[in-house]
């Protein structure tokens, strides 16, 4: 029986702790620490794109009133062209594309629109935090498949064991936040085969699609039998360094897109009008920007990862996203949360404890207990400053 969304939303979301990203950014602001926690770049995206937004606000266009709920046609058409150009996926911009308020709203709309109470959802753990919140609201039941250090690969046996008679969805995230893992062909094929065999719908969060380092991102929708059962989610924020714009999208077969739209209309109703033409412009006229950003980001990734390793912090390779993970156990810390809460005072730097992206287990063992996530989407100077502060501090517990 469907639950009453109003009541369940209020009580369940109130019971969850506030999002770690906001808490750690507030801690950075309070302490004056360098914020390598919440993932946002310190340099804005292309000037030409910013200019289109400015013109749409205050120029002749004056796109300051409500856009259609599904998004303006030029944006939906540009998103369809983007999927075709990069992945050969052909979409009808009128029925198979909607604009959302960032990928976070696309996630919420997809889950609220599709998941029924009691449905089981196979999810990669560590989870992006909003997956847990939204699945709680929907009454969806998480079936985690855990990506474990040092490689953060999908264990195919664990994956197969996670699918049962009540499984209806797979919620994917690749490139994966927070591990930096990019799913490979073998992993994607195994997921696709299971989805076809068990008639599962895949909701695929690909928000870091362009930010990979030497490994190509492959949307699962391009695998055999997957286009008709995959709702793909992404946004402009990460690819074009405008995380505060909050314009994202959901693409896929009309029945899945319609379900997401049915929920989206009660969330934001419609997404930022003046930003929509600017995002369309970015996708059509600055198609090379994300690949350039990824090349540049790869250098900064290496700078931070090498720097952390030189400080005695075992840090894992990251093939994509804004993030890399360290194991603070080598410095005597059993608890990454304790490390992160202490770090601003100790060293003037903020990082994110990855343990909060894991489920509590009956045996109390959290596979992310000692893992800490660092954002490298910052200028080289900022990364160097953070590394110098860490080097000057006593990092051992
Ligand atoms: N996606 C960003 C991160 O993982 C944060 C988004 C948010 O603050 N909700 O750091």
Image (spheres, rainbow, N blue to C red):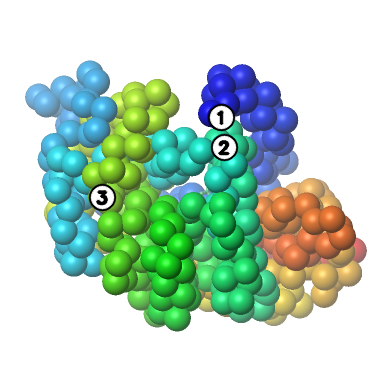
Mark whose residue sits in front, 2 or 1: 1
- Against 267, residue 150 (above or below) is below
Left/right placement of residue 15 relative to residue 365 reads: left
Mark 1: which secondary structure? loop
Q: Earlier in the sequence, mark 3 or mark 1?
A: 1
Where residue 377 appears, x then y in whole percent?
49, 59
Q: Is mark 1 within 8 Å of ligand 1?
A: no
Q: Earlier in the sequence, mark 2 or mark 1?
A: 1
Specify few, some or many for label 3: CA neighbours under 10 Å numbering under 14, 14-19, or 20 or more: some
Q: Which residue is mark 3?
A: 253
Tag of residue 1: 1
Left/right placement of residue 270 relative to residue 189 reads: left
Mark 2: which secondary structure? loop
Q: Earlier in the sequence, mark 2 or mark 3?
A: 2
- Against 169, residue 32 (above or below) is above
User: Which quadrant of the figure has residue 346?
Assistant: bottom right
CA distance for labels 3 and 1: 27 Å
Answer whether residue 371 is visible to the viewer in this image. yes
Q: Which residue is mark 2?
A: 117
Where residue 324 appears, x then y in whole percent?
59, 67
Where residue 161 appears, x then y in whole percent?
62, 69
């Amino acid at each position: 029986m469907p639950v009453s969304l109003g009541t369940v939303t209020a009580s369940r979301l109130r019971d969850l702790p506030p999002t770690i990203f906001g808490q750690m950014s507030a801690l950075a602001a309070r302490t004056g620490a360098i914020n390598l926690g919440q993932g946002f770049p310190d340099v804005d995206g292309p000037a030409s794109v910013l200019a289109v937004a400015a013109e749409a606000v205050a120029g002749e266009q004056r796109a300051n009133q409500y856009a259609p709920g599904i998004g303006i046609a030029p944006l939906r058409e540009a998103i369809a062209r983007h999927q075709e150009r990069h992945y050969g996926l052909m979409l009808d911009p009128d029925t198979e594309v909607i604009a959302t308020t960032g990928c976070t709203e696309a996630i919420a709309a997809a889950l609220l629109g599709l998941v029924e109470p009691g449905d089981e959802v196979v999810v990669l753990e560590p989870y992006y935090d909003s997956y847990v919140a939204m699945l709680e609201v929907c009454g969806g039941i998480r079936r985690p498949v855990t990506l474990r250090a040092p490689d953060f690969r999908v264990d195919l046996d664990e994956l197969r064991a996670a699918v049962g008679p009540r499984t209806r969805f797979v919620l994917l995230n690749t490139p994966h936040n927070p591990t930096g893992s990019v799913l490979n062909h073998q992993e994607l094929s195994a997921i696709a085969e299971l989805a076809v065999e068990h008639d599962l719908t895949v909701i695929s969060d690909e928000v870091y699609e362009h930010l990979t380092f030497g490994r190509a991102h492959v949307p699962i929708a391009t695998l055999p039998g997957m286009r008709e059962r995959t709702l793909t989610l992404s946004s402009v924020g990460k690819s074009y360094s405008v995380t505060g714009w909050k314009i994202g999208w959901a693409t896929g077969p009309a029945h899945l897109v319609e379900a997401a739209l049915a929920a989206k209309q009660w969330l934001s109703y419609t997404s930022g009008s003046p930003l929509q033409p600017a995002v369309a412009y970015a996708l059509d006229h600055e198609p090379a920007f994300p690949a350039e950003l990824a090349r540049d980001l790869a250098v900064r990734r290496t700078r931070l990862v090498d720097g952390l390793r030189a400080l005695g912090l075992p840090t894992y390779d990251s093939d994509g996203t804004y993030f890399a993970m360290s194991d603070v156990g080598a410095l005597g810390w059993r608890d990454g949360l304790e490390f992160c809460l202490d770090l601003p005072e100790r060293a003037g730097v903020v990082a994110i404890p990855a343990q909060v992206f894991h489920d509590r287990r009956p045996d109390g063992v959290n596979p992310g207990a000692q893992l800490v996530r660092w954002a490298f989407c910052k200028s080289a100077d900022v990364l160097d400053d953070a590394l110098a502060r860490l080097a000057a501090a006593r990092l051992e517990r």
